[in-house]
Amino acid sequence: MVSAKNAVSKVTGAVSTTPTTAKTGKYKVTVTQPSGLAKATGAVTVSVKHGTTVRKVTGTLASGIVTVTVPKLVKGTWTVSVAYAGDANYAAKTAAGASINVTK
């Protein structure tokens, strides 16, 4: 018998350091699990999109958190989606993250 995986409570993303046209930035992803259960582990992919341009970066969770480096981006507002791949305990989940506004 295969037991079902637990669902994570939520997946959130926030800009730590805004990227510019000249410098990379940082984006922090937090995967929250139900109280009392093990912290989520595994891969997270952050996709940023502006028009038809999409950039993807991947990181590995440590205690439910990962900060990934976002590449240099052109000016404008970039929408962000975060995809948690799941692990031995938790099912995969996707969510919209905070957008990135590149001004310089």
Image (cartoon, rainbow, N blue to C red):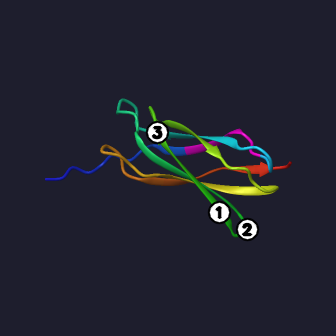
**What's the residue type where badge 1 is placed?**
Val
- In this image, 16 relative to 86: left or right? right
SS label for mark 3: strand
Instruction: Count neighbours of disc 1 (C-alpha within 10 A) and say few if under 14, some if 14 to 19, many if 20 or more.
Output: few
Residue 77 rendering spot, x and y as whole percentages:
77, 56
SS label for mark 1: strand
Residue 73 rendering spot, x and y as whole percentages:
75, 54
The majority secondary structure of the magenta stretch comes to strand
Which residue matches tag 2?
51
- In the picture, the disc for residue 54 is 1
Q: Among all residues in the image, which is located at the extreme right?
A: 104
Compared to 52, does 63 lie above or below?
above
> Residue placed at 81% from the left, 57% from the top?
76
Compared to 45, does 31 lie above or below?
above
Camera-side residue: 73 or 79? 73
Q: Which residues are magenta?
A: 12-19
Of callouts 2 and 3, the N-terminal one: 2
Residue 42 rendering spot, x and y as whole percentages:
41, 44
**What's the residue type where badge 2 is placed?**
Gly
CA separation, marks 1 and 3? 22 Å
Q: Among all residues in the image, which is located at the extreme front?
A: 22
> Residue placed at 40% from the left, 39% from the top?
41
The answer to whether marks 1 and 3 mark residues whose Cβ atoms lie closer than 8 Å is no
Residue 80 rendering spot, x and y as whole percentages:
64, 54
Q: Among all residues in the image, which is located at the extreme top?
A: 36
Which residue matches tag 3?
61
SS label for mark 2: loop
CA separation, marks 2 and 1? 8 Å
**What's the residue type where badge 3 is placed?**
Leu
Residue 75 is one of the magenta-drawn residues: no
